[in-house]
Amino acid sequence: MKPALAELLHNPLLWRGDSLARTDDVIGSGFAALDAELPGGGWPRGALTELLFDEEGIGELRLLAPALKRLAQSGEAIVLAGPPHIPYAPALAGCGIDPGRVTVIDADGRNGWWAAEQVLRSNSAGALLFWPEAASDQRERRLQLASQEGGTLAFLFTRTARAAQPSPAPLRIRLLRAANHLHIDVFKRRGGVMNKPLLLEVSVTHPSAGNNGPAESVIRPLAKPDRLRASRSAAHRQHPVGGPYALVWNRALARADEMRRMPGPDPREEGGSRNERTGALSSASTSISISCL
């Protein structure tokens, strides 16, 4: 082999189709078997990762918990855009993820895609987790381009029906429940084809449980029939009355109640122009609720 060709083949910016791409900008998944199948040995920064599954609560968040824990401990923010359930703050704390580092954006439709794109373009968060109501190639392409501008971990949760359709996401993983394990099929990546799917045990031991067994629910969501509603009373929310994380959760609820009671500007006030009233009503109808746990 000629020296020039050998030098080119050893260039880290070049990868062959039968081998995994090389990249140093990754965050370890916390699972050695999975890192061995991911290009660079972890979740890629500056690239969109698409996780496809049909059944919620099979371990899709516990799969990301080790990486999110590392980001939170390093002071990075974690943004959840359009989650289907209200995140359970004590469970996040039990995973080592400070709830104060987690921001929830309650937005749907085009507002959700816009919010997710702005998070990536601003490069102000360590990770973005986005649950769109419906996905499209054009919108995913915008997220992929936005993620390339910064070093944010970007995860997009979609249905397995999207697996047969093309996607601009360089990393696509199909998730299925397999008894007490998570069946992982990396069917698109920058590298060779995966030989066989993985079976990972994603349960995590809760600190209060010691070494007796795994936590009953590491990321336990509260039921949310529609979207987050600001008019919902805090008395109807389920939260712990004791335990090591009760103070964190109760403080978050008190902050949310205080923000809800703050009076806002009345667009019907006299002296406001017609344009101002129209703008106020328009912004109220398309508002995006952002809450910090």
Image (spheres, rainbow, N blue to C red):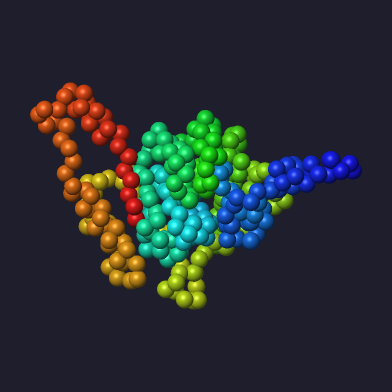
Q: How many marks?
A: 0
Q: Residue furthest right?
A: 1
Q: Position of residue 120 (x, y in %)?
A: 47, 41
Residue 139 visible, this angle: yes
Specify the farthest residue to the left: 270
Q: Is residue 85 left or right of residue 154?
A: left
Residue located at (59% from left, 52% from top) = 26
- The answer to which of 206 and 27 lies nearer the viewer is 27
Residue drawn at x 44%, y 46% is 124
Q: Is residue 52 visible?
A: no
Question: Based on the displayed image, in which of its 4 quarters is residue 252 positioned?
Answer: bottom left
Q: Quadrant of residue 102?
A: bottom left
User: Which residue is drawn at the image coordinates 45% and 64% (left, top)?
Assistant: 96
Q: Is residue 276 left or right of residue 270?
A: right
What residue is rendered at 33% in x and 71% in y?
A: 243
Query: 27 and 217: which one is in front?
Result: 27
The N terminus, quarter of image: top right
Q: From the viewer's perspective, tell me whether residue 150 is left or right of residue 245.
A: right
Q: Identify which residue, 110 or 11, lies in the foreground.
A: 11
x then y, percent, for residue 214: 49, 69
- At which x and y percent is residue 155? 51, 46
Residue 51 x, y percent position in the rendering: 54, 46
